[in-house]
Image (cartoon, rainbow, N blue to C red):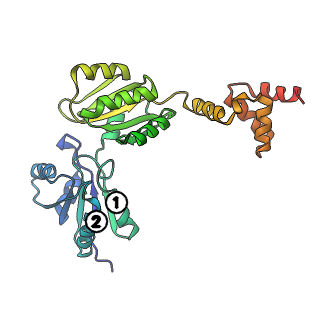
């Protein structure tokens, strides 16, 4: 029989303490120890809930070295709760390495879901959100940051980012440089007293923040590239030299690559914005 303890991944409020779930309260009460990103921040929540519990600091900078200590506690049969300062652990917060290790080694891990800034921001935003991609924080290193932004300029879905207020202006400038003047939404201080969702474009946002600055926790939503697939395909064709081929030559190339002729004609028509019958007739006329 496995007498090892359980790790509970507990979602906590992102601002309004009233958003804590009944299950989260019950879990925090019953575990032996709480792993906290910032013990001072967690203590505020515990005091609000009138819960007295031993907390261990578990943050991004000590995550790897703390795994051994956590495993030893679980092996002793202790139940632990992992919490971040706000929202769900692991989502741009500590927990990634620990959870992977425990799952790999067959420890019991249970999630106690709670509010997340991602879903809250998407829900309040006026932007098209049928599909979206969560990008978290952009890389800080210039090379990796440039590579990520180069890739994202073709993304057709709504993009959701996290950013610190003091870094937001530079991020907006980088986004405009690589993505152009997109429509955005700055969701600020979600679930708190001064919650707001600012709907504007990148140029307007840069001007606004340069003039007045911005404070508070921020989720940034950026509209996708409506012609992303077409732009990416055009760039690929330019690099491969396909853009200089006639429709018939491109069809033949795809056929030689192993594609069915009917599918090749359909693909060329889609790539070049033509009616497939038009491409078909060109292939027939030139035979």
What SS does tag 2 mark? Answer: helix
Camera-nearest residue between 257 and 115: 257
Residue 4 falls in image quadrant: bottom left
- Coordinates of residue 62 in the picture (x, y in percent): 24, 59
Q: Tell me if residue 169 comes above or below residue 75 in the rendering.
A: above
Residue 275 falls in image quadrant: top right
Tell me the crowding category of disc 2: few under 14, some 14 to 19, or many 20 or more residues within 10 angstroms, Cα based. some
Q: Residue at x 24, y 74 (%)?
A: 77
Q: Classify residue 244 as left or right of residue 28.
A: right
Mark 1–mark 2 contact, CB under 8 Å?
A: yes
Tell me the crowding category of disc 1: few under 14, some 14 to 19, or many 20 or more residues within 10 angstroms, Cα based. few
Q: Which residue position is annotated with label 2?
A: 67
Q: Residue at x 38, y 36 (%)?
A: 160
Q: Earlier in the sequence, mark 1 or mark 2?
A: 2
What SS does tag 1 mark? Answer: helix
Disc 1 from disc 2: Cα separation: 8 Å
Q: Tell me if residue 158 comes above or below residue 39 in the rendering.
A: above
Q: Which residue position is annotated with label 1?
A: 97
Which image quarter is the N terminus in? bottom left
Asked if residue 143 shows in the view, the reply is: yes
Q: Residue at x 65, y 31 (%)?
A: 238
Q: Residue at x 19, y 40 (%)?
A: 16
Q: Classify residue 151 as left or right of residue 104.
A: right
Residue 109 falls in image quadrant: bottom left
């Amino acid at each position: 029989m496995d007498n090892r303890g359980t790790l509970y991944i507990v979602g906590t409020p992102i601002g309004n303490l009233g958003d804590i779930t009944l299950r989260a309260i019950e879990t925090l009460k019953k575990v032996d120890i709480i792993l906290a990103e910032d013990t001072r921040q967690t203590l505020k929540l515990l005091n609000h809930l009138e819960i007295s519990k031993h907390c261990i600091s578990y943050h991004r900078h000590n995550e790897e070295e703390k795994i051994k200590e956590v495993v030893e506690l679980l092996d002793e049969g202790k139940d632990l709760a992992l919490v971040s300062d706000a929202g769900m652990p692991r989502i741009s917060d500590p927990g990634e390495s620990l959870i992977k290790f425990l799952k790999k080694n067959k420890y019991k891990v249970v999630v106690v879901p709670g509010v997340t800034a991602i879903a809250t921001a998407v829900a309040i935003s006026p932007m098209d959100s049928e599909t979206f991609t969560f990008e978290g924080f952009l890389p800080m290193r210039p090379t990796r940051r440039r590579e990520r932004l180069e890739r994202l300029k073709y993304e057709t879905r709504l993009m959701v980012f996290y950013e610190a207020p003091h870094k937001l202006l530079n991020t907006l400038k980088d986004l405009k440089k690589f993505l152009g003047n997109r429509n955005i939404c700055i969701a600020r201080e979600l679930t708190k007293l001064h919650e707001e969702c600012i709907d504007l474009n990148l140029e307007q946002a840069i001007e606004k923040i340069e003039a007045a600055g911005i404070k508070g926790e921020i989720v940034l939503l950026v509209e996708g590239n409506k012609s992303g697939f077409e732009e990416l395909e055009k760039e690929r064709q330019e690099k491969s030299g396909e853009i200089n081929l006639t429709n018939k030559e491109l069809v033949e190339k795809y056929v030689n690559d192993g594609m069915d002729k009917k599918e090749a004609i359909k693909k060329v028509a889609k790539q070049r914005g033509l009616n497939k019958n038009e491409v078909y007739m060109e292939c027939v006329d030139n035979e």
